[in-house]
Amino acid sequence: MTSISSHLVVRNAACIENFELMAIQPESSPTGYIIECDLVYPDKLHDKHSDYLLAPDHLTVVDEMLSPYSRNLINPNMMWKPSKKLVPSLLYKTQ
């Protein structure tokens, strides 16, 4: 899964593999970075980040993912079908 839905317009872009992530100093560098990685959201951060989650995903939302509140909002006279949405979530994210 990925959060980027289209290519970015950039100049002089380069792919760097196997570099030291902690060596990046964004405050003092004119270079911007896009990091592609697997992301695990530690349980200890769930409450701290519950209002604004990092790294939303494009997910197909199916019935099993809906909360009881969301299920109650579905109009019984209309057919509900799964749909792809940009969803902030605490799920593990993989490339």
Image (cartoon, rainbow, N blue to C red):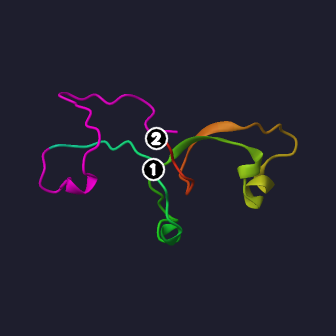
For image coordinates 21% across by 43% down, the residue present is 32
Q: Earlier in the sequence, mark 2 or mark 1?
A: 2
Provide the residue designation for mark 2: 3
Gap between marks 2 and 1 measured at Cα: 7 Å
Residue 11 is covered by the magenta coloring: yes
Report the front residue among 93 and 53: 93
Secondary structure at badge 2 equals loop
Residue 18 position within the rendered picture, expressed as x and y whole percent measured from the top left? 29, 43
What amino acid is at disc 2?
Ser
Label 1: how many Cα within 10 Å (few below 14, some 14–19, many 20+) = some
Secondary structure at badge 1 equals loop
For image coordinates 53% across by 68% down, the residue present is 43
Q: Main secondary structure of the magenta part?
A: loop
Q: Are marks 2 and 1 in contact (CB under 8 Å)?
A: yes
Provide the residue designation for mark 1: 55
Range of magenta residues: 1-30
Q: Is residue 19 left or right of residue 4?
A: left
Residue 35 position within the rendered picture, expressed as x and y whole percent measured from the top left? 33, 44
For image coordinates 28% across by 28% down, the residue present is 9
Residue 13 position within the rendered picture, expressed as x and y whole percent measured from the top left? 22, 30
